[in-house]
Every structure is written in structure tokens, then in C-alpha cells.
Image (cartoon, grey):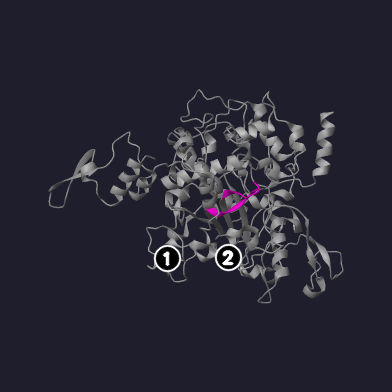
Amino acid sequence: MSHASVLLALLISAGCTDQTATSAGSVKSNSDEVINHTYPYQEGDDIPALAYIEHNETYNPESVIPPQCYTKTEGVNNPCYACHQSYDASEKRPNQMGDGTLQGNYEFSDVGLTNSWKNLFIDRTALIAGIDDATIKKYVEQDNYSASFGAVSGGTEPQGTRSQDHNANVAQPKNTWLPDYMQIKNLSAAEGAFDEAGMAKDGSKWVAYNYKPFPSTFWPTNGSTGDAMIRLPANFQQSNGSYDRTIYMLNLSLVEMALKDIESLTVAPVNEKRLRIDINKDGELNEHETELVRTSHYLGDASNNKLAHMLYPEGTEFLHTVRYVGVDDEGNIYNAPRMKEVRYMKKHMFRTRESLASAYYAEAKDKHFEKLPQTRYLGEQGIDNGFGWTINGFIEDETGALRPQHDQELAFCNGCHKSVGATFDQTFSFARKVPGKEGWGYIDLHSMEDVPNINEEQGEFLTYMQRVGGGDEFRQNGEMLAKWFNDNGMVNKEALRNAKSVYDIITPSPERAFALNKAYLTIVKEQSYLFGRDATLTKATNVLSNIDAQQPPLKPEHRFKWDMRLNWDKAATEAVAKTNEQ
């Protein structure tokens, strides 16, 4: 965005537009007096993103179509399969979206045929040229999360935080602060905020879990690091009205079983005699039991709640931070203290499979009659996705302080957390958690290998790169292409199989990390999130700006059945894969 555009936006917000008007209209008042109104923009102007918000003008009615959906597939490159799936009815999945036909088909509304994510088409190399590595490194090492807590009653700001436009001695409105339910003390320190089992040290009962990042938007090499935490309602944490950590962790494991549809998991040692519960169903009460077998109901004070197939219990909460890519003094990649976004979901209402079926039917009906997507806004609480979940989020303002996302910015969240065929109860990461006891703790890319998805043989990320033809949806991550692809454009399978961990596969070089951080910072300064949040360095060339009938659909042999759950028994699947290659 040009400095002129920024100035124009400021003038608009201040009402100083009389001298800059370029179009006009007139209306009659109650006294029949003709009142002329002037408007600051004309067709073709480069209107700033915030101007749409300030004037309550919808920029993109189809913001639920993510930027990745405009990727040129050329009939053979398929990043679509990771989100769009149709499953057999015999599985009785609550997710009945059945959108597998969207793989490589641009089945958009007339409005959606135009790609509104215009940040994809900006070359940011000149914009970041004046930002040196030391400056961006210092910026991403700052803690803007703790600074967003404020005082309990909307009090004064913490010292040394937020914009210079704010007076640190003046009370700010409550709604500018991060709500209590989105707060974990010391979360900017990443794993430092949790104990070895993932429990938040501040007593908030948030629990971090280790999961394999979803391909490929959430790979650090494509712009961001992140984490995820889960919290269950109080009765799932208690026994006889008192907090019981063992009961809480067992119930969390039962949630994992329900969602992944599995029968047993490893757990931290449990004294069955104290609980008077035979957790492994062997007919005995042991003092050091490490296996939990699935039960029909949750435990402790949640014993009246049944496990529901592939669904979370009502009141389940998720917290997810999207962060800059940290680079330490040795060049290692880590989750930076500075956060781009803080995202929150709460299951405010439990819906049965039958109830969800009606919601999916309503979605399909609206699409059939070419109705544009509707978002229910809840004010400071965020948005309702229509499937029982409340979604809320904070994002950086132009100074780097976290602010509430505007309605139009939040509507973007429904693109992934509403009606996508591959999700589990409208979520992604928990179905990808490292199973059992080993999966409780802060995300650690060094601790996991490129295990395959269930019903697959090769490593998931290897398979993804083969199907996509690159290391990101847009096939423009040159570093990934150089690192994991041969000169003939084929994936170097041997190199990927020999990678020590997921960390070695999906983290960028320090140089790329700095560049990605700088590119995103320019979006922050512009506040142009309505135009896209992807930190692309150069203009995207494998993305369509407009969809027309000439775009070839994916060929049948390049469409895939896929399940985001993972087969963590890597040794067995590798043996099968190598045998099939011989």
C-alpha cells in the first residue's frame, strides 16, 4: 500500500474527505432538502483494506474460499486433497460435507470466480529491502502476547507495550484486551509455559499437545510457526467436586480416543486403587497402570457424559497461536515470542451426528441456490460457525500490538472451520496429535518423523510433495524445490526418507525465515489482512486471478482419498512401501 493510500485512509477515518472526493450522489432529507454527499473513491481506486471495515463495506463476500483454492492445478498438481474429501457412509462420520469433488474443480459462485486475495500478486522484495535482519530479529523476539493482557477491569496498559498512539497511563476499553479465556501466562516463551506433560504452569488448565503440522500452510518454511492447546470443562477435570489431575488427563485421553476412533492409549502411570477404576479393564486394580482402554463414558464428575464418535464434548476449548519464524543465534528455527495471531475455538453446543447432518444439508442447499455464505457475528465473542463452535481471534495492529479481529477478518476462519470435508469436528490438529502419553507436551518438530497417514505407505510430507509438485500449495517455495526435488522436477524420495525429523523437512534457512518475517511485517503495516495473510515474497505465478471455463480440472488419476489421521507405527509402513517398490 502506498503512503498516499495510508494517508487517504486516515483522512477518511477522521472525516476529512471533502477536498478529496471523486464521486458524488444526493439524497433527500425529511424536509425534502437535497443533500449532496461526496465519496472518497471511484471505481478502480486502490482502496485500503481498513477502509472497507471503517465504512462497513464487505470486501469479499466469499472470504470462506481460502487463497489456496485458486491454485493452478494444470490438471496434475493436487494440493486440494488435504481439505476436500468424501468418505464412505459406513464410517458414520459426523462430518458429512462430502466435498471430494472439489479436488481440482473450481465450483465457485459467480462472486468467487474472481480471486479477491490480491496480496498474492504483490512482489514484496522491494518493500522489504530496507528492513535489515537485525531489525526483524529484534522485532519477532518481542512479546506482544503478554502485553495484550491488560488489567482485570480494563485498567492501564502494561509497561512498554502497544502503540505510541496509546497513552500508557490512560485506561483502554475492555474489548481491546485479550480475554481471560485466551490467556496463558508466559505463553510467549513457548514450551516454558508448560510442564513436561503439557499442563500450563499458571493453573489455567490449558494443556499443550504435540502434533504433526498440517501440510503445508502451517510449515515454518511457508511463513509461520505455531502451537495448539486444549482445555476441557471443569467437570472433566474433577472428581467429587475437587480438581484431580489424573482424572483430567484420563479424560483428555478419552477425548483423543473418541475423536480418532481408537480403542486404547498409553497414559502416565495411574494408581487404579486410588481412583477405584480399572482403566485397562484387566479385572485388577494396579498402582502403576500405563494403558487406558476406551470406556463408554468419561470419568470423574463427567461420568454422565458419553463418548461421542469423532466428536468433542460440549465446552471443549482450543487455543492456537500463529507466530513468526524465530531464528536463534546458531541459526536454529523455533517458535518466536511474537505472535501474528491468537486463535480460539469453543464448542458452545453439542450437536449429534443427525443434527450436524441438517447443518450440512443447509450448507448444500444454500450453495445449490447460489446463496452467498452467511456468517453469524457475536460481537466481542467472535463468530458462530453454525456447527456448534464459537470462533474468535486477535491479530497484530499496525504497531505490532494484538487487537481483536474485525468481523470481516474473522469470517475468513469459516473457510477452514465450518464446512470442509477432511476435518474432525471442524478441527485439524488434535486428530494429528502424537498418540497417548508421548503426545502430551508442547509441540516439538524434532521428536517426530515423517510418518504416513493411515491407509498410506509413504511418509505424509513426501506423498504431499509428490501430489502437489512442490513444497507449498502454490509451488513457489524455491528453497523446498531445491532441497527436496531433483532437476527433473521429481521428488527426491531417498533424501526425504533419510531426513532425521520433521524439523529437517519443513523448516527454512535463516535467510528465508528473515525474508518471510519481513514480508509479513509489510502486511501488518498495511493492515491488509482482508487481501490475504500469506507471506509470499514474490508475485504468485501458479495462482489464478480469475476462474474461467478454460481451466482444466484435475485428471481422475490425480485425485486422492485421504485421511488426516496418522499411522505412527512408521517401521511397519516403511517396510511395506519398500517391498512394493521392489
Query: Magenta segment, principal secondary structure?
Result: strand
Q: Is residue 496 visible?
A: yes
Tell me which segment is drawn in magenta.
324-339
Do we see residue 178 in this rendering?
no
In the picture of the structure, the residue carrying the numbered disc 1 is 174
In terms of secondary structure, where does tag 1 sit? helix
Tag 1: amino acid:
Lys
- The kind of residue tagged 2 is Lys
Where is residue 164 shown, x and y percent of the image? Answer: 39, 58
Q: Is residue 337 magenta?
A: yes
Q: Where is residue 300 in the image (x, y as percent from the top left)?
A: 70, 71
Q: Residue at x 30, y 51 (%)?
A: 13
3 relative to 540 in the view: left or right = left
In the rendering, at what x and y percent does residue 532 appear? 47, 41
Rate crowding at label 1 as few (under 14), some (14 to 19) or many (20 or more) other CA atoms within 10 Å: some
Classify 45 as above or below 526. Answer: above
Q: Quadrant location of residue 491?
A: top right
Q: In which quarter of the image is residue 257?
A: bottom right
Q: Badge 2 is on which residue? A: 185
Task: Measuring from the top left, give residue 363's x and y in whole percent.
Answer: 51, 44
**Would residue 314 be counted in the magenta stretch?**
no
Do tag 1 and tag 2 residues touch (Cβ < 8 Å)?
no
Image quarter where the C terminus lies is top right
The CA span between labels 1 and 2 is 19 Å
Q: Which residue is drawn at 78% across and 57% down?
A: 265
Q: Residue 563 carries which label?
A: none
Residue 346, compared with residue 494, is above or below; it is: below
SS for dot 2? loop
Question: Mark 2: few, some, or many residues within 10 Å (few <14, many ≥20)?
Answer: some
In the image shown, does 497 or 24 lie closer to the viewer? Answer: 497
